[in-house]
């Protein structure tokens, strides 16, 4: 941990030039390579015989490169992770009353996808050390109506996939068989689980290529990976009006310009993740020993992307004191921390009403204890040190309140 003298020295140099936000608006780094890639496809498209195509070059190339990167057999590019999650839920053909288990500490996309496909959201608790879906809790919530388990690789760390897949096998649906495990890896592009990249496990995995995520395709975009050809064909067909399988569909396509940029970003992904990891590991050292804070945990069998650097305040600091930390960090140090994420039923009335009567004491508690401290691959070591020193000072101030 940084001692008082070191903190004074670091803070003396003043605030970083960058106003660091908990979730910076551009999660990766863009330079001339991305601009050139985009422009080259635009020039190509200016030929009236060519245009922007129907999911043509370089979309299949991007899908293949992404699938190969993750170790999955198939990749299907889409316009955003949200529609990707919608497709995976629609593929299940849910009937009214069919249940999908989703963690409550989550972004709203996954539960909304369950609702949108006509299913019933069943909340589950997360492990308070990792913020990942808790397999034991999931097992207790399985009923004969359970159709799928939908873990999110929360904040960039992999969910405990083997345990979840084992539970899914142990509790087959009476008609549909073993429960599909479908991952939301919006924050976990580049993450690893037991030596393999996220995207190769379970029935399917949905990635986000939105502007804030680890890599992005011009601000919006997503990718579905799967080893199941039928699942991939369904998504590929639904992505464009159901032409391939003569079924229902709509338009959720990625543009060729985005795919060209995606190919460039994908090559840089490992470097972005490494930069985040280096900063996170350094920050652990600067902060470890601050009794009021629990630092993000990376189990030995996983590689965290540190999309978010999530800290839990000690239990009796839940709520007001946690909020005070965020306030002082912003007002006094110009460091913007965020709460990602409170339980979805707190964040959105529509989800609260949909899941009325379900109570999750652990999620309530974690939601009142967590905060995310800015991290980004372009962050300078000085800024990382400043943020760490500011956080220790802030904890000291809150202690005296
Ligand atoms: C960002 C995010 C999404 C949605 O991604 P889009 O590509 O913007 O649709 C879904 N789930 C999680 C966990 C996210 O962080």
Image (tube, grey):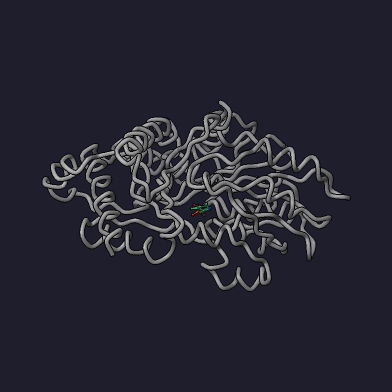
The residue lying toward the viewer, choosing from 196 and 48, is 196
Q: Residue furthest top?
A: 195
Which of the pair 226/253 is nearer the observer?
A: 226
The residue at 48%/47% (across/down) is 155
Quadrant of the image for the N terminus?
A: top left
Residue at 39%, 52% in the rendered image = 372
Q: Is residue 354 left or right of residue 396?
A: right
Q: 43 or 160: nearer the eye? A: 160
Q: What percent of the width, then of the height, locates residue 352?
A: 60, 70
Q: Quadrant of residue 146?
A: bottom right
Name the residue at the front extreme: 400
Residues 377 and 158: in front is: 158
Q: Residue at x 36, y 42 (%)?
A: 28
Left or right position of 115 against 308: right
Residue 161: percent from left, percent from top? 64, 38
Answer whether residue 202 is visible to the viewer in this image: yes
For the C terminus, the quadrant is bottom left
Residue occupying image coordinates x 48% and y 42%: 156
């Amino acid at each position: 941990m940084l001692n008082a003298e070191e903190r004074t020295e670091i803070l003396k140099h003043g605030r970083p030039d960058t106003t660091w936000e908990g979730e910076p608006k551009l999660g990766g780094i863009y330079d001339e390579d991305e601009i050139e890639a985009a422009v080259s496809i635009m020039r190509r498209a200016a030929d009236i015989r060519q245009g922007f195509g129907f999911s043509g070059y370089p979309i299949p190339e991007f899908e293949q490169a992404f699938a190969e990167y993750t170790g999955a057999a198939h990749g299907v590019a889409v316009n955003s992770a949200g529609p990707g999650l919608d497709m995976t839920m629609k593929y299940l053909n849910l009937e009214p009353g069919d249940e999908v288990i989703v963690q409550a500490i989550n972004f709203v996309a996954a539960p909304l996808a369950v609702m949108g496909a006509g299913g019933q959201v069943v909340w589950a608790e997360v492990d308070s050390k990792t913020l990942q879906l808790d397999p034991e809790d999931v097992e207790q919530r399985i009923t004969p109506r359970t159709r799928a388990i939908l873990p999110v690789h929360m904040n960039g760390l992999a969910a405990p996939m083997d345990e979840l897949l084992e539970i899914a096998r142990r509790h087959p649906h009476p008609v549909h068989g073993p429960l599909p495990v479908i991952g939301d890896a919006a924050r976990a592009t580049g993450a690893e689980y037991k030596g393999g990249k996220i995207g190769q496990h379970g029935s399917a995995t949905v990635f986000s290529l939105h502007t804030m995520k680890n890599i992005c395709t011009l601000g919006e975009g997503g990718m579905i990976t799967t080893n199941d050809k039928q699942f991939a064909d369904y998504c590929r067909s639904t992505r464009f009006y159901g032409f391939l399988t003569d079924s229902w569909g709509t338009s959720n396509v990625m543009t060729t310009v985005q795919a060209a940029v995606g190919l460039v970003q994908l090559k840089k992904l490992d470097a972005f993740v490494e930069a985040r990891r280096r900063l996170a590991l350094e920050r652990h050292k600067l902060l470890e020993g601050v009794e009021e804070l629990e630092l993000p945990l990376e189990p030995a069998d996983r590689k965290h992307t540190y999309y978010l650097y999530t800290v839990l305040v000690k239990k009796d600091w839940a709520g007001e004191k946690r909020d005070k930390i965020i306030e002082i960090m912003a007002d006094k140090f110009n460091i913007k921390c965020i709460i990602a994420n409170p339980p979805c039923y707190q964040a959105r009335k529509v989800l609260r009403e949909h899941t009325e009567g379900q109570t999750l004491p652990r999620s309530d508690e974690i939601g009142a204890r967590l905060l995310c401290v800015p991290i980004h691959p372009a962050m300078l070591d000085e800024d990382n040190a400043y943020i760490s020193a500011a956080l220790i000072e802030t904890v000291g101030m809150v202690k005296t309140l």
